[in-house]
Amino acid sequence: MGEYTNLIIIGVIVVFVIILYNRIIALKQNRNNAFSDIDVQLKQRYNLIPQLVETVKGYASHEKELLEDVTNARAQAMNTKGMGETKSNAESVLGGAMMNLLAVAENYPDLKASENFNKLQGELSDIENKLAAARRFFNNATSEYNTSIQQFPAVIIAKLFGFKEEAFFELDAVEAEAVKKAPEISFN
């Protein structure tokens, strides 16, 4: 009887370890899928940028340095692989360059009145909104994964199989500053 009891206990422990391991794997995969959603939005933004640059170039050709900055930032962001801090920094630089491009557009009334520019700007705004939602989903998935590998008894399985805490997709410096800055309100 004692031999069967030991086998049953060992069997239960093995099944429990397998269940915990599979849960961690599922959460990690969910995080990877969430990053793929971010990647899709980033690719759409990358594809839109050349059209936007060409449109601005037609109205503001002497803004050559700014247009080159946007093009270079796009190339850098596209060539940065993975989902770590390097990717986040490259996207931050691109976001800043795009904000500068849109700010310069304010100086050109004909450009602001251009139907093509307004369409592209609307598409960019839509992509940025979807990107923000994808980042929130990614950060939720990351939080759930990180929490799961820190809780007992999964922490034992996580250490045993080398699962490590993963980084969040942080706000870039420009976005973080915009969040901290109080909005300007005019009652005129």
Image (cartoon, rainbow, N blue to C red):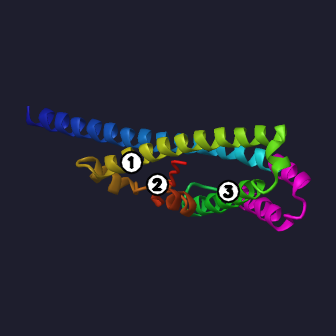
Q: Mark 3 — residue?
A: 99
Residue drawn at x 74%, y 48% is 46
Determine the secondary structure under disc 2: loop
Residue drawn at x 51%, y 62% is 177
Q: Which amino acid type corresponds to the residue marked 1 in the rendered image? A: Ser
- Residue farthest to the bottom, as pictured: 65
Earlier sequence position, callout 1 versus callout 2:
1
Which quarter of the image is occupied by the N terminus?
top left
Measured as percent of width and height from the top left, residue 91 is found at: 63, 57
Q: Which amino acid type corresponds to the residue marked 3 in the rendered image? A: Met
Earlier sequence position, callout 3 versus callout 1:
3
Q: Which amino acid type corresponds to the residue marked 2 in the rendered image? A: Phe
Q: CA distance from mark 3 to mark 1?
A: 29 Å
Q: Mark 1 — residue?
A: 143
Q: Is residue 98 left or right of residue 37?
A: right
Q: Is residue 141 above or below residue 76?
A: above
Measured as percent of width and height from the top left, residue 147 is found at: 32, 49
Q: CA distance from mark 1 to mark 2?
A: 8 Å
Determine the secondary structure under disc 1: helix
Q: Is residue 15 above or below residue 102?
A: above
- Residue farthest to the left, as pictured: 1
Residue drawn at x 55%, y 45% is 35
Q: Is residue 123 above or below residue 147?
A: above
Point out the stretch of residues depicted in magenta: 51-80
> Is 158 or 187 nearer to us in this picture?
187
Mark 1 and mark 2 residues within 8 Å of each other at the beta carbon: yes
Total numbered labels: 3
Q: Is residue 148 left or right of residue 179?
A: left
Q: Mark 2 — residue?
A: 168
